[in-house]
Image: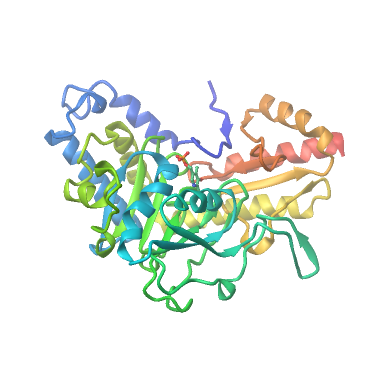
Amino acid sequence: MARPWNFSAGPSAMPEPVLAQAAAEMLDWQGSGMSVMEMSHRGEHFIQICSQAEADLRELLAVSDDYAVLFMQGGATAENAIVPMNLLGRVSQPKADFVISGIWATKSHQECQRYGDAQIAATNAVATTIDGVHQAPFTWLPKADTWRVRKDAAYLHLCSNETIGGVETVDWPDMQALGAPDVPLVVDASSHFLSRPMQINRAGMIFAGAQKNAGPAGLTMVIVRRELIGHALAICPSAFDYKNVDAQHSMYNTPPTYAIYIAGLVFKWLKQQGGLAAIEQRNIVKARTLYDYFDQSAFYTLPVHPSVRSRMNVPFFLCNTSLDSAFLKGAQERGLMQLKGHKSVGGMRASIYNAMPLEGVEALIDYLKDFERTHG
Ligand SMILES: *Cc1c(COP(=O)(O)O)cnc(C)c1O
């Protein structure tokens, strides 16, 4: 049976060779006589799998030894609480600043309010006009030189790819240039993690749930500058204190072993593809091909300002929204799955992560053209 093209925002399509290898190794991982999911996390086989995954992730992203790489659970949503519980203790008054770029950053900001003074440094939650064109809330980004960051904040939070709104920050801000050199940047990179080389050194920490672009749900990857570790608030659960997780090499308690193994296979696959610089080139071509099609069409519209369009998540609308359900039904019949937009935005969304080849984007464009021809 042919696999359909899966445009889901997450959990999302996986590279097929990774699934094939996992299937081949399901009953017997490399002569061990057992499945990875049956192995003790303290045994030599799993320790080898986990340390190889960490080494490959470090190599892909060029992460230096100044940073700990942690494999955790709870998803990015749990990190919205785990981050403030770990970092607010660094400063005398628990405070943190937030760039509101969409729904995910808003959620992070709200959660932090439970632990301290969470202030908005900049927000796109309002409509604006750019070059005479109206932009709805969450479809544009305030320029970094307008952000107001408190010099004594424990950190500045940025969601560098808003999965729902489709707004991406490709250049992470330089905190020195923002006039807050002592404030570490914390980046929720969940939905474009490993889609391109990243400016790790600009960030104090980066976190990402695996299920968007790096593996199965259940694993959260945290990359954190070592000097930021060890200041957790007293209320922080010990299993979520980065100090404990780091000291035990992500084995303070039982980690999501099978998810780590699969993510490790994805890291190997990325290396075989030529690493992140090569995968970025492919992602640029995919995104450009799709956006170019939409830009020349009067039948579909794109909500996001061209300067901040995401390469990973492409929201779009049919100008005639009464055709939405016919569009989705026809797409599904052609094996184009999960194109329905997030309920808060409506319309459509195509997520084109690393595992989506150009061929899948072209299949989508063929359908977009046919639908426009028959309904336009
Ligand atoms: C999906 C997502 C989250 C939430 O992830 P969970 O695993 O459901 O907690 C947070 N931030 C971003 C940017 C996301 O894409």
Query: Is residue 170 at least partly visible in the picture?
Result: yes
Tell which of 204 and 30 is nearer to you. 204
What residue is rendered at 44% in x and 34% in y?
16
Residue 261 falls in image quadrant: top left
Q: Residue furthest right?
A: 376
* Image vertical order of residue 183 relative to residue 189, above or below: below
Residue 231, horizontal then vertical, whole percent? 26, 59
Q: What coloring was used for the rendering?
A: rainbow
Side (left or right) of 238 relative to 159: left
Side (left or right) of 190 relative to 123: left
Side (left or right) of 41 relative to 332: left
Q: Residue furthest front?
A: 93
Side (left or right) of 89 relative to 1: left
Tell which of 125 and 376 is nearer to you. 125
Residue 21, horizontal then vertical, whole percent? 33, 31
Q: Residue furthest left?
A: 44
Tell which of 153 and 351 is nearer to you. 153
Query: Is residue 274 at least partly visible in the picture?
Result: no
The quarter in which the C terminus is drawn is top right
Residue 272, horizontal then vertical, whole percent? 36, 48
What residue is rendered at 26% in x and 41% in y?
239
Residue 346, horizontal then vertical, whole percent? 71, 39
* Image vertical order of residue 93 relative to residue 301, above or below: below
What residue is rendered at 31% in x and 64% in y?
90
